[in-house]
Image: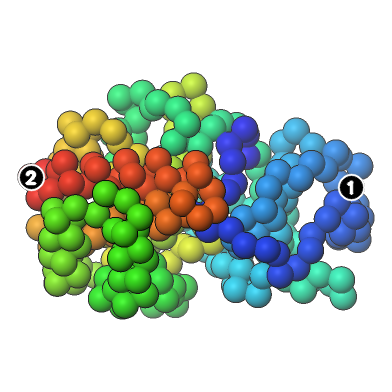
């Protein structure tokens, strides 16, 4: 999707090898009218391998068992939400089916031109536009909406596993200040005080595409789920360097309780620490995203309202 990277917070060796020959075979068998287009490998993420197809399309193929249900959620649910969202999202153009050679469904998506948000500055006008996107997305979800065990859940459910990562980053860096520790503990204890709503579930700078200063798309909807909006609101501290912009998002969003803001800061810490850990162990470019997130949370503390 444009010039932006598709690297996740964490990477690992693939559990299923996906090469150009396999992709071309899948296209010939299921979408032969597209098989003549040039295929270019873009990157391998934690869940999917991506290829550019011609000038206008992107292929997204799960590379591990856990990714299969995620891409199906994306295929089923995102088209039902896309029309109400004020920012483009890559709804599926074609669906690929499993074969004897490849075990999961896969997607052909539109190509979105741009660069991921951590690499470029956004126009000031995008602050309100992103807020409008969040409000349009965060509507009550139906009872049969997909459930995700690690997104949109109470932070207490994440604290045991996260605690080990938190301690490791504390030992390796000076980012885990007493203030960050206090904010995290407040967030974990903050009550869940809102109904479950639709979430993107993975709304960090690598999944926000910017073209010429404007947000051109929100990508990677595999974690779409029903749950606590605080998970998505963590993006406030991940995307906006200026404190007044973060204040503007919160004010414009409206009707956010103190408990919700506390949980949102907790989610920003959780995700930020994940990026720092990734930056120190796998992908150095992630470290600056995580560090900036933690520093912004500490700067704002609970003074944003």
Q: Nearer the viewer, mark 1 or mark 2?
A: 2
Residue, far front: 171
Tally of numbered tags: 2
Q: Quadrant of the N terminus?
A: top right
The location of residue 117, given as percent across then percent down, is 45, 35
Work out which quarter of the rendered image holds the C terminus and state it.
Answer: top left
Callout 1–callout 2 Cβ contact below 8 Å: no
- Tell whether 2 sits left or right of 82: right
Picture coordinates of residue 27 (x, y %)? Answer: 86, 55
- Secondary structure beneath label 1: loop
Residue 142 in view (yes/no): no
Residue, x 37% and y 75% (percent of image)?
A: 161
Above or below for 258 versus 245 = below
Q: Which residue is mark 2?
A: 303
Q: How is the image coloured?
A: rainbow
One can see residue 117 in this view: yes
Q: Where is mark 1, residue-wise?
A: 35
Picture quarter containing residue 196? bottom left
Is residue 153 positioned above or below 285 on the image? below
Q: Viewer-proximal residue, 166 or 79? A: 166
> Separation of disc 1 and disc 2 at Cα?
55 Å
Left or right of 28: which side holds 289? left
Q: Residue at coordinates 10% horizontally, 50% vertically from top-left?
A: 302
Tell me the quarter of the picture where residue 132 sits.
top left
- Measuring from the top left, give residue 176's x and y in whole percent: 24, 54
């Amino acid at each position: 999707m444009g010039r932006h990277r598709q690297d996740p917070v964490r990477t690992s060796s693939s559990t299923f090898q996906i090469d150009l020959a396999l992709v071309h075979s899948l296209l010939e068998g299921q979408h032969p009218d597209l098989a003549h287009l040039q295929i270019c490998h873009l990157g391998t993420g934690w869940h999917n391998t991506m290829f550019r197809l011609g000038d206008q399309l992107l292929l997204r193929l799960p590379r591990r068992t856990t990714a299969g249900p995620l891409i199906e959620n994306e295929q089923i649910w995102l088209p039902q939400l896309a029309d109400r969202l004020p920012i483009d999202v890559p709804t599926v153009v074609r669906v690929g089916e499993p074969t004897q050679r490849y075990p999961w469904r896969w997607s052909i998506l539109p190509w979105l031109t741009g660069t991921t948000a951590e690499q470029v500055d956004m126009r000031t006008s995008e602050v309100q536009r992103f807020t409008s996107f969040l409000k349009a997305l965060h509507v009550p979800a139906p009872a049969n909406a997909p459930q995700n065990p690690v997104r949109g859940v109470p932070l207490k459910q994440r604290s045991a596993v996260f605690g080990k990562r938190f301690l490791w980053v504390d030992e390796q860096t000076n980012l885990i200040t007493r203030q960050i520790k206090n904010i995290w503990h407040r967030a974990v204890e903050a009550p869940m005080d809102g109904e479950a709503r639709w979430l993107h579930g993975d709304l960090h700078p690598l999944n926000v595409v910017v073209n010429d200063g404007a947000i051109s798309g929100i990508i990677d909807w595999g974690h779409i789920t029903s749950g606590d909006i605080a998970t998505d609101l963590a993006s406030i501290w991940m995307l906006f360097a200026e404190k007044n912009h973060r204040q503007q998002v919160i004010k414009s969003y409206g009707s956010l309780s103190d408990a919700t803001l506390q949980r949102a800061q907790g989610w920003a810490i959780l995700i930020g620490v994940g990026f720092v850990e990734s930056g120190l162990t796998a992908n150095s470019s992630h470290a600056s995203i995580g560090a900036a997130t933690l520093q912004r949370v500490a700067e704002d503390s609970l003074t944003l309202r």
